Amino acid sequence: MKNKKLKLKVLITALAVTGVAAGLAAYTLASSVDYTSYDAPYISPSDISIAGDYAFVADATLDKVYKASLADQGVKGTWDAGRTVNGVVANGTDVFALSGELDGTVTKLDANLKKVAEAEAGHTPVAAVVKGDKLYVANRFTNNVKVYNTSDLSKGGEDIEVGREPMAMTVVGDKIYVAKHLSEDAANDEDGTAARVAVIDTTKNNAVTQIRLTNGSDGVKSIVASEDGKYVYVSHVLARYAYPTSQLDRGWVNTNAISVIDAAADKLITSVLLDEVELGAPNPWGLAINGKQLVVSISGSNQVFTIDTDQLMKRIEDVKAGKNEKVKTVEAIADYLPFLDGLRNKIDLSGEGAREIAVADGKAYVCQYFTGDVEVLDLKTSAVTGTISLGNQPEANAVRTGEILWFTANNTYQKWESCASCHPEGRAGSFNWDELGDGIGNDKSTKSLVYSHRTPPVLVTGCVDTAEQNVRGSVQSADYTEEQLNCLDEYLKSMTPVQSPYLNRDGTLTKEAEEGKKLFESEGCVTCHPAPLYTDMEKHASAIINDEEKNPTWEKSDMDTPTLIEVWRSGPYFFNGCFKTLREAVEASLKPDSKLTDEQIDNLTEFVASIGNQNEYYGVEQVRSTSADGTEKINALQQGSMINSITLKKQLDTTQQAKVTFTLYKKDGTKIGGSEMTETLKADMKVGDTAKIKTEINVPDSLEKGDYAVITITDAADGSAKLATDLKLVY
């Protein structure tokens, strides 16, 4: 489905110019609206599980589970979850579907995909394993594993806390290994920063230990155990964040790895690089075992690698025994790019976006997220032997194209990394990076890019005016056209915050967060973090800027005020990632004379952690203006400028038609010119659709500091119902 664009001519009501603003320029009386819809029924297979003669596939965007025959590679049935399907596990004649986000649900289906039972899960259930008569489900954003009885999904044990973002699980004997996506360390921790694997003892149903991966491990995607249960393998990015980002050669910024864990001792043995000296293996994702073969999908380059595990372990043992002249210690294996030379067998895929893998009878079945099918590989001959088609895939529109570009490394220098290597899913990673725009030695935390196009300037120091400029500056080593760069912009602008796990299941604030909201206002947090964007888009001195312990290396400059939207997900916190927890960051941000009790700080943190786009049915994406000298600004007022466009996005489902009003005010609240621009948007906009109001609004030369503009979005029927918090742009 291609982009749809409609134009509608409208009149803008202009009230008489009052004496207060005599001599100021009036608004133009006409505008046009371009509507763009990115709605398309994409098929996005992300997980797969095989039982008997059938594969069961989870579709993340069409909200389905497919049943496909391995014999004739045809789809034999579907089940519609009515919400995003994050994972699927087949066990005998049972199929367990994991769906939803804040409304996470686990559903038991029979082999014909008929619902048998259903139960509430945590926030975003993503992985599950069966152990005996128990089903263990990992909930990504509630950081726990829930236990169910497989028979009827009744509660099978207490919830098990495992730590930040559990993503995948595998069973060895009485233990379950839980791979976690991101590090829980402070970015400047003296012991380094790395993701971990939690180990659950199923006889006690608790997490008994945490296995720390090699320093720099992040973006963990999958985990699998060897057939004999001796070893556990984990796929992830291995970042070289201690170095300035001056080059990409030889994995200077990011490498890509498999970590090997000794299952008997629950100890990390080492991490092994999948890359070659002059060619990366970007963003390893799915893992599977085929006898003595480890099968790895390489998402960023659309490949599958197979590795002989016996030979791999022999090479590691040779290092331990001092028989490797190039690598003297097991720990040094993680820094030696040629270690797998001769052991990697590469298979190129025909599709795009390799994700999880399942293996049966010597064949690998690889989910291809963007192509919308499952590719079949013969692991003995390393040949592609077929494709399981899940339906007709629509043509990629601008947002989908941008998403593909975000996750691919095929256009980047030697395929070392994709955009997702540092910003998984467009969010924050775990590390500080020493980028070169402000010299050497000033490490900065990786920011989430949610709403980055709405909240200029960008980067920690606010040293780049717009997100568009930063996108182009960040992909200089990639061969992208301006059209492709525009698609990257559209993908980033399409991202909306995931509902916070700190909310009630129905999306409302908890009692504690309601109390915290009052404190957010009374303590003055709202001054720098006003709704709806929760940033004033200004630079301020950080609370720790002169703290030699928390900030020993930075120059004492002001920092950009970050948005607090989806901040629950973006730790570690502050410009140098010095705080592990959001509570620490909130407490450090309080005024020196604050008298808040511990309970009140907890409540304030609960509110901050809850901030998203609740009740923001529409949002102002960008207000673009041009000054007399041609300088363009986004979401900012300029003296003597022309506001050329106001772009809005429908963010949440509502049947209420929106009316948009733009008004300029003096700092004392008096309307400038006594004029208003009012636009009624079309009624059938879908969630994700944008409306670009193209107009010519003259901003006076006499604009003074403190003057401001307000954009209100109300119900078009009578204007009484707010469909979004007013956006205030202050000069």
Image: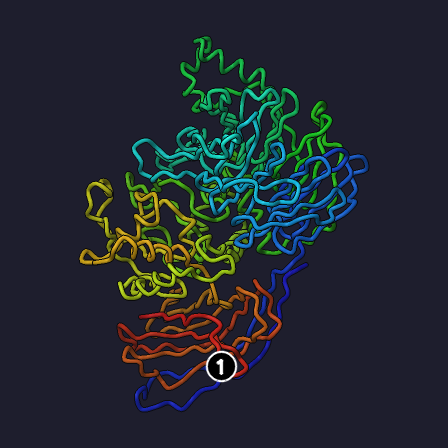
Camera sees residue 196: yes
Q: Within 10 angstroms of label 1, few (less than 14), some, or many (20 or more) residues?
A: some
Residue appearing at x 49%, y 81% in the figure:
719
Residue 623: x and y, percent? 43, 68
Camera-side residue of 654 and 257: 654
Residue 607: x and y, percent? 37, 58
Q: Amino acid at mark 1?
A: Gly
Camera sees residue 248: no
Camera-side residue of 431 and 143: 143
Residue appearing at x 19%, y 55% in the figure:
592
Residue 453: x and y, percent? 44, 58
Relative to 105, residue 240 above or below: above
Q: What's the colour scheme?
A: rainbow
Please state if 105 lies on the left or on the right of 672 as rendered. right
Image quadrant in which you'd find residue 174 = top right
Residue 234: x and y, percent? 52, 30
Residue appearing at x 33%, y 65% in the figure:
518
Relative to 145, residue 378 above or below: above
Please state if 273 lies on the left or on the right of 228 as rendered. left
Which quadrant of the rendered structure holds the N terminus? bottom right
| Callout 1: SS | loop
Which quadrant of the rendered structure holds the C terminus? bottom left
Image quadrant in which you'd find residue 355 = top right
Residue appearing at x 62%, y 25% in the figure:
306
Q: Which residue is mark 1?
A: 719
Camera-side residue of 700 and 538: 538
Please state if 204 lies on the left or on the right of 552 as rendered. right
